[in-house]
Image (cartoon, rainbow, N blue to C red):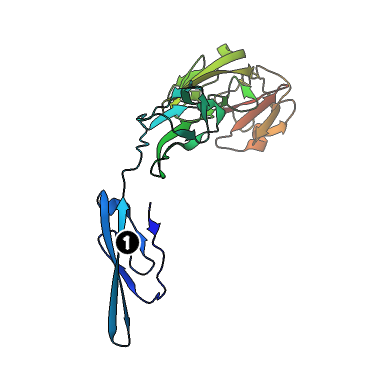
């Protein structure tokens, strides 16, 4: 801490000395001096004349407010930690700091995640000196272990990535085919409810959670009687699928509802036929050529 020396009547001069850190304002830093007497000099020039005066400042030993608790990092769910100082009799302050009797502690659960400082201030009434020390405490938030996915999952859907609240964890559970990337691969064996588990560590803080997903059955769209080839003048063919009620698309489809295929409408060459069928939750398709 720097001290401002009272200014003389003529303020046009400059201060000098090993303890002076601002020669104009006369700021005095006791840490640059020695215990005991320290001399500072004030010099002012006026009309070609130079005048000097000196001042002796006595530096006394101040109290030692050193905190012995090391800087630390905590999770917001951790228990309180004790704080200690080299010398007793001081005052503690800071967010999350509490004093009960002779016990001083920091409770990470009483503050939001962030960076904090605990302060210890010690005064010496005999000299009037005061000292303050601080220690940094970082509180990390609990990682979010919830997992989200599509609102509707069908058994024939393509694999997709689960989305964790906090990335970097490990996924497990039926349907999880990549535990690191969180790839979920639906299949008919998963129809119904299935659980996905996620365990994540961030900044040394651990959390885990489970999320329930529902997999709906996809209708079977398999076209069952598609001929390998037909002649251009062949009779119409009524195509059939494993699940009725869908729609037919492609060259040669004479009736998109019934599945009636007309080779003359298709013309020569390869005709691609697509059948799309839906149920209450899912849509599926099959393609033949």
Observer-nearest of 198 and 110: 110
Question: Which element carries disc 1, helix, strand or loop?
Answer: strand
Residue to which mark 1 is pinned: 21
Left or right of 264: which side holds 258?
A: right
Please report the residue visible at 40 percent of the width from the left and 76 percent of the height from the top.
10
Placement of the C terminus among the 4 image quadrants:
top right
Q: Is residue 159 visible?
A: no
Q: Position of residue 69 (x, y in %)?
A: 37, 29
Q: Position of residue 124 (x, y in %)?
A: 40, 39
Residue 7 higher or lower than 181, as above or below: below
Please tell me whether residue 21 is drawn above or below residue 85 in the rendered image. Answer: below
Does residue 41 appear left or right of residue 90 in this picture? left
Residue at the image position 33 percent from the left and 55 percent from the top: 29
Q: Position of residue 84 (x, y in %)?
A: 39, 27
Q: Quadrant of residue 45?
A: bottom left
Q: Quadrant of residue 271?
A: top right
Q: Residue at x 28, y 58 (%)?
A: 19
* Res 84 visible: yes
């Amino acid at each position: 801490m720097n001290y401002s020396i009272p200014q003389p009547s003529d303020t046009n001069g400059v201060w000098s000395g090993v303890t002076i850190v601002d020669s104009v304002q006369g700021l005095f830093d006791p840490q640059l001096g020695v215990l005991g007497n320290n001399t500072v000099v004030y010099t002012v020039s006026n009309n070609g004349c130079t005048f000097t005066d000196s001042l002796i400042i006595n530096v006394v030993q101040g109290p030692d407010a050193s905190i012995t608790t090391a800087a630390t990092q905590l999770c917001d769910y951790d228990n309180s930690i004790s704080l200690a100082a080299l010398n007793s009799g001081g005052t503690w302050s800071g967010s999350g700091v509490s004093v009960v009797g002779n016990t001083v502690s920091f409770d990470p659960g009483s503050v939001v995640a962030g960076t904090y400082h605990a302060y210890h201030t010690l005064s010496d009434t005999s000299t009037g000196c005061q000292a303050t020390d601080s220690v940094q405490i970082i509180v990390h938030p609990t990682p979010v272990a919830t997992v989200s996915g599509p609102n509707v999952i069908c058994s024939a859907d393509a694999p997709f990535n689960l989305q964790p609240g906090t990335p970097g964890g490990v996924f497990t559970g039926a349907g999880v085919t990549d535990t690191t990337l969180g790839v979920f691969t639906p299949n008919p064996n998963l129809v119904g409810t299935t659980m996905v588990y996620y365990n994540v560590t961030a900044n040394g803080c651990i959390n885990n959670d489970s999320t329930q997903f529902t997999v709906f059955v996809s209708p079977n769209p398999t076209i069952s009687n598609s001929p390998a080839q037909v002649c251009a003048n062949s009779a119409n063919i009524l195509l059939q699928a494993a699940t009725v009620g869908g729609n037919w698309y492609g060259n040669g489809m004479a009736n998109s509802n019934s599945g009636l295929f007309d080779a003359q409408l298709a013309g020569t060459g390869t005709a691609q036929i697509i059948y799309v069928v839906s149920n209450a939750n899912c849509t599926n398709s099959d393609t033949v050529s």
